[in-house]
Image (cartoon, rainbow, N blue to C red):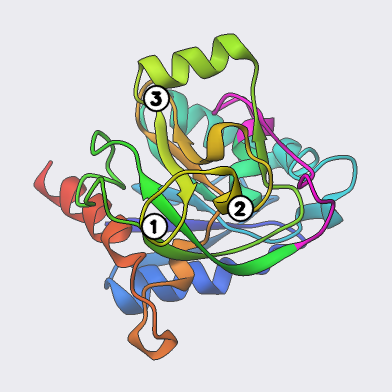
Amino acid sequence: MKVGVVVFPGSNCDEDAVSAFRDQFGCETVKLWHKDHDLQACDLIFLPGGFSYGDYLRSGAIARFSPIMQNVIEFANRGGLVWGVCNGFQILCESHLLPGALLHNSHQKFNCKNVFIKPETNNSLITNQLELNKALQIPIAHGEGRYYCNDETLAGLMANHQILFRYCDAQGNINEASNPNGALDNIAGITNLGRNVFGMMPHPERAVDNELYNTDGRALFSGLLDAVVKA
């Protein structure tokens, strides 16, 4: 499997993603510069975290108009796999590849800590190997991570099982106390109707290495990679 990690001016989690895919899972991995149009025949496009274009206007609002995003959008619309984490999730929402928006955290502070999330469905490539009742400890690092959408969109996400993760406590309980940013319905990640575009605020690429004393993110990668290989 060949993975392309898009690099925007202000990206700072691209090396984390490259290390995860290349060093931990043995994927052929290339960096894709935001001004280019060539996706280099990648099977998966990964939009990393960071502060693209300094987070001016809104996080991801300018990156959405980077030249390469035209190709990423076309790729996704043809069924290509796209995964965005943190700023990448924000860019996917700004690009309308995923519904909703990411707003400033409810407490107006930057969050950088470990949190717990619980998978809500196994019907996606990044959650198919996860236990639905098991909480995963995954780091977050964001100032605009509060997921929001209107009531109609939320109803659609729930009806179509598009909510991938919700914030929870260590025991898997979903409550206000376990919500680190005020996200609507504790939503931490979603997928599109076609189930080929995935977005989430927590950073699973920072939880795949034994040397970091956290491997709770590994099953997201292995589930995706195994499913693609079998296909």
| SS at mark 2 in the image | loop
Give the amino acid type for the residue marked by disc 2 in the picture: Cys
Residue highlighted by disc 1: 3
Residue highlighted by disc 3: 78
Residue at horizontal 36%, vertical 28%? 79
| SS at mark 3 in the image | loop
Mark 1 and mark 3 lie on one chain; the one further toward the N terminus is: 1
**Magenta highlight: main SS:** loop
| SS at mark 1 in the image | strand
Question: Pointer 2: residues within 10 angstroms few (<14), some, or many (20+)?
Answer: many
Give the amino acid type for the residue marked by disc 1 in the picture: Val
Q: Are marks 2 and 1 in contact (CB under 8 Å)?
A: no
Q: Are marks 3 and 2 in contact (CB under 8 Å)?
A: no
- Disc 3 to disc 2, C-alpha distance: 24 Å
- Disc 1 to disc 3, C-alpha distance: 17 Å
Residue 13 appears in view: yes
The front one of 5 and 148 is 148
Q: From the viewer's perspective, is the residue at label 3 or at label 2 nearer? A: 2
Q: Name the image quarter holding residue 90.
A: top right
Residue highlighted by disc 2: 86
Q: From the viewer's perspective, is the residue at label 2 or at label 1 nearer? A: 2
Q: Quadrant of the C terminus?
A: top left
- Is residue 2 found left or right of 94 in the rendered image? left
Magenta residues span 93-110
Provide residue 3's location: percent of width, then percent of height.
Answer: 39, 57
Provide residue 197's location: percent of width, then percent of height.
Answer: 43, 35
